[in-house]
Amino acid sequence: YKKKYSGLYCVGCEEYYKENDLIDGLCPEHKVAPELIEEENYFFKLSNYQEKIKELIEKDEVKIIPQSRKNEILSFVNSGLQDFCISRTSERAKGWGIDVPGDETQKMWVWFDALSNYINALGYGSDDESKFLEFWLTVDGQKMSKSLSNVINPYDLVEKYGCDAVRYFLLREIPALGDGDFTFEKLEKRYNSDLAGGIGNLLSRTLTMINKKNIIFNRI
């Protein structure tokens, strides 16, 4: 449905925020004050589906893992689902994006359109066993974003530290079922203490002992 809406809008996030979502009046991601914008947009009536969504999750018909994430989502649903804006005016979108069917004055909100494309590309709906996990890899506690200029290029890391060192850090520091955070300080700490000081030191001592004892290993 379509209605006039007034809200605090962050251009970097392409998202509206409530006042209690802000930190000292600033966007929590981009640390800038959002703009107060009033316009007419289309909304998705998510509130109509609250009980059905809750039932599907509780019965594991929509399975969410790990359990901590399931509890988090259920808590969010129980707090009351709100209808949300799914379009932007073509003028504010500067003509970029997909038209709302039948209304050339409106463009689909990029994340409403893009997320459905992601899960469809992964085969959502093709079978009953499909599962999708989404976790954040942050940088120094902040989401990676081009607008924040904090995107980490993995090729640069490999060139400086080596492929095995980067692999070790990711396996050691980033949880398999949860958000992870990257900083150069953490990487260099693991590089120096674990790889050089721990594994590297063990290997050095072992090889030194083998040479001193003139130990010969038979090739199998």
Image (cartoon, grey):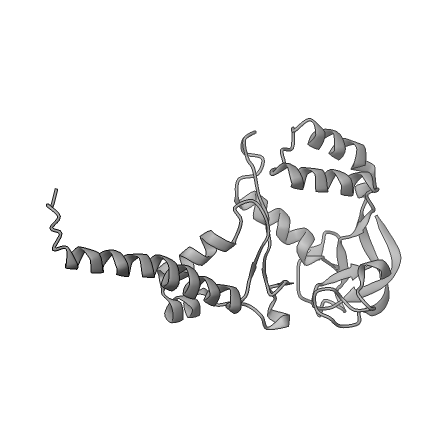
Left/right placement of residue 87 relative to residue 146 reads right
Please identify the quarter of the rendering in which residue 67 is found. Answer: top right
At which x and y percent is residue 213? 14, 55
Name the residue furthest front. 213
At which x and y percent is residue 148? 63, 71
Q: Count of labels shown?
A: 0
Q: Residue at x 82, y 37 (%)?
A: 48
**Which residue is more in the foreground, 52 or 90?**
52
Q: Residue at x 36, y 65 (%)?
A: 162
At which x and y percent is residue 99? 70, 57
**Which residue is more in the foreground, 44 or 99?**
44
At which x and y percent is residue 183? 54, 66
Image height of 48 relative to 196, above or below: above
Image height of 129 relative to 14, above or below: above
**Which residue is more in the foreground, 27 or 83?**
27
Q: Residue at x 83, y 68 (%)?
A: 25
Please identify the quarter of the rendering in which residue 92 is found. Answer: bottom right
Residue 149 appears in view: yes
